[in-house]
């Protein structure tokens, strides 16, 4: 039975953990020589290796398993792209400032922190109705708009944390980092706030790579940037962070049924649905098939990627009883979502969103189609002709050509290629308007209603156009890394003896090669073992220093190396070594020739340590070797 590592347990370990993070340079604030910049972090060798392994297994678990197309789109993004996507107008948090010092706070965070501090300080002295009011505000504060936030700050007398000064009225603050491209054109641009837009803009190319067929998915791992108002919490709220995102394009008529979902209909995952939140209840395990059938989750495609996300998090070492999927409330949803869930992980700071899973509908492809005049759509092909009511657009091509000259053909092709729903919208538009302006290849071209007619006909067609919907899982790599570090950190009976019980998949180094004593004879064996391991792509760390073996174990334990190979006197005569596992500290004796393949299988999760214990004899270290 797995024990939940709740917030209190993790907090007790936090001070010791932070000392290890700093001492072993897992990650640290950037530019510390110059005083540092909030929200920016450098990864050291251990942190960098863990992050790389998290990303690599993400590629295996999603890109390879789901046959996704991986791309690498540019970080610099012109303003019109993010204007079309809605980020310029909507990508904001509410900002409040100390009325005297000007110090900025994110409104929802200062309200939450203030009320949580009051609850903790007052304890049982706090009136029940007051506490209930505080908890209700904390639960819903993420959804408050400007007026509501202003009202709450005034009602509950929220002040600046450091000074106790009054706060300014909340105002929207855009989180994107602006820049300028080029010395002469000075094109307004931003550092991308997400990797998603690069995949939407390359949709037509990716569709072509997939033979024009839907469904298919695109994936991207790369940096995102958000100008956080008050970054804090280590890697939880950064201004520069690594993301891993998938955009899975589906036919809207087919996303409710997804063949591969059948594999997971009986998988139980803890869900915190809208209804449970409204009833102030805790998350509950649901069979995923039932959650879709009962309408809790919008469709099978979204549910499938929730299942895959849950399994990924468990595989890389997140304690499964510290995972829940929380559904967004209706007034909390992003502007593009029709359903959205956050995979949250309980950490020392509470429940933290680490993965967002959204049904983005057709919002993005529609937005970029409208902005550019380029049709981002797919075709639903039929094996035999199908009768369809088709709204035909009949254009007076001669007059259009006479009026628009060479641009006339571009307008004709554009209008004739409109999907059926947009042709219907155009027909309704001309019932009350004289002219319609289309932006095509950057030009505004006008069509007068006298030059177009609409006729409804029944026709046999071999295909029909549609704009795909998108299911998006978006992973915050830094947040997941911090969760893994917190969940994996342990202390032995002596609190100074710490170790990380990483999943071998993400461990920064897969094994250490140590010697019982310093010896040139052992050096030869260590070098041969190192060469054999590296040929298989297995990372290892060697230590033939003249210190006690126990101290060598402690040094490798502290950075979470899961397996330790020890060379001793018997190695020279019997051609065998001992193999030690970090958590149990149990050791077995293994022939040298079998060690590389054994470590490879353990690191890939093909076998478990329990399998090793049943195959090889246990080894008891001599007292002088300890």
Image (cartoon, grey):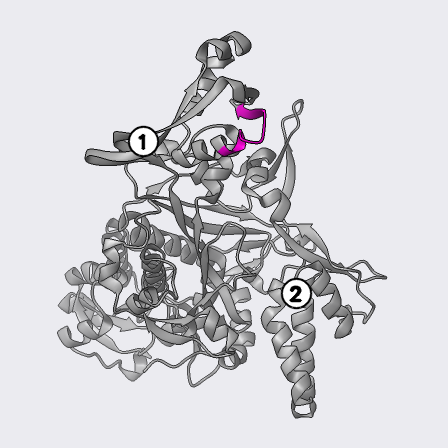
The residue where tag 1 is placed is 208
Q: Is residue 387 above or below residue 160?
A: above
Q: Give the magenta-colored segment's residue range.
A: 428-439
- Name, please, the residue furthest toward the right: 100
Q: Is residue 552 above or below residue 450?
A: below
Q: Secondary structure at mark 2?
A: helix
- Image quadrant holding the C terminus, namely bottom left
The residue where tag 2 is placed is 108
Residue 503 showing in the rendered view = no
- Image quadrant holding the N terminus, namely bottom left
Give the x, y percent position of residue 329. Answer: 52, 64
Q: Is residue 407 above or below residue 9?
A: above
Q: How many marks?
A: 2
The front one of 616 and 366 is 366
Give the x, y percent position of residue 211. Answer: 26, 33
Residue 376 showing in the rendered view = yes
């Amino acid at each position: 039975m797995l024990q939940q590592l709740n917030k209190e347990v993790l907090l007790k370990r936090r001070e010791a953990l932070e000392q290890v993070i700093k001492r072993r340079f897992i990650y640290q604030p950037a530019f510390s020589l110059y005083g540092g910049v909030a929200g920016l972090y450098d990864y050291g060798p251990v942190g960098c290796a863990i992050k790389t392994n998290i990303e690599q297994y993400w590629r295996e678990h999603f890109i390879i398993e789901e046959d996704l197309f991986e791309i690498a789109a540019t970080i610099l993004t012109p303003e019109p792209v993010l204007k079309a996507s809605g980020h310029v107008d909507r990508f904001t948090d509410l900002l409040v400032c100390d009325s005297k010092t000007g110090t900025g706070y994110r409104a929802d965070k200062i309200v939450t922190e203030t009320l949580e501090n009051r609850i903790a300080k007052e304890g049982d002295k706090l009136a029940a109705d007051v506490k209930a009011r505080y908890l209700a505000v904390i639960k819903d504060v993420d959804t408050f708009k400007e007026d509501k936030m202003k009202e709450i700050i005034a009602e509950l007398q929220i002040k600046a944390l450091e000074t106790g000064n009054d706060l300014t009225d909340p105002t929207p603050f855009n989180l994107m980092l602006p820049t300028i491209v080029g010395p002469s054109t000075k094109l307004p641009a931003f550092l991308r706030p997400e990797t998603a837009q690069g995949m939407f803009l390359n949709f037509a190319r990716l569709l072509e790579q997939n033979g024009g067929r839907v469904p298919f998915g695109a994936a991207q791992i790369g940096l995102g940037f958000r100008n956080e108002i008050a970054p804090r919490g280590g890697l939880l709220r950064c201004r520069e962070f690594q993301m891993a995102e998938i955009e899975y394009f589906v036919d809207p008529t087919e996303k409710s049924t997804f063949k591969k979902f059948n594999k997971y209909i009986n998988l139980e995952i803890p869900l915190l649905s809208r209804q449970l939140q409204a009833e102030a209840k805790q998350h509950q395990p649901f069979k995923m098939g039932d959650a879709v059938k009962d309408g809790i989750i919008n469709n099978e495609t979204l549910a499938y990627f929730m299942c895959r996300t849950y399994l990924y998090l468990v595989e890389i070492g997140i304690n499964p009883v510290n995972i829940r999927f929380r559904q967004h409330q209706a007034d909390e949803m992003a502007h593009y979502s029709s359903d959205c869930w956050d995979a949250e992980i309980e950490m020392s700071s509470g429940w933290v969103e680490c993965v967002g899973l959204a049904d983005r509908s057709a919002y993005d492809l529609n937005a970029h189609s409208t902005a550019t005049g380029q049709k981002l759509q797919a075709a639903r092909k039929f094996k035999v002709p199908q009768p369809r009511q088709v709204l035909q657009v009949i254009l007076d091509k001669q007059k259009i050509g006479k009026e628009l000259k060479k641009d006339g053909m571009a307008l004709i092709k554009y209008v004739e290629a409109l999907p059926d729903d947009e042709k219907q919208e155009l027909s309704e538009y001309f019932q009350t308007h004289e002219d319609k302006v289309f932006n095509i290849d950057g030009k505004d071209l006008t069509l007068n209603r006298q030059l177009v007619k609409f006729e409804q006909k029944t026709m046999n067609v071999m295909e029909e156009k549609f704009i795909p919907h998108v299911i998006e899982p978006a992973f915050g790599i830094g947040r997941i890394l911090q969760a893994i570090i917190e969940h994996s950190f342990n202390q032995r009976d002596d609190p100074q003896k710490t170790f990380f019980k990483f999943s071998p998949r993400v461990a920064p180094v897969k094994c250490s090669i140590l010697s019982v004593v310093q010896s040139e004879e052992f050096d030869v064996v260590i070098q041969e073992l190192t060469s054999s391991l590296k040929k298989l792509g297995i990372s290892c760390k060697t230590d033939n220093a003249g210190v006690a073996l126990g101290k060598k174990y402690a040094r490798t334990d502290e950075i979470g190396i899961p397996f330790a190979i020890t060379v001793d006197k018997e190695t020279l005569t019997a051609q065998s070594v001992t193999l030690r596992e970090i958590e149990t500290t149990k050791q077995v004796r293994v022939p040298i020739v079998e060690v590389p393949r054994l470590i490879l299988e353990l690191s890939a999760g093909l076998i478990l340590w329990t399998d090793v214990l049943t195959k090889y004899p246990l080894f008891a270290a001599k007292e002088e070797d300890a």
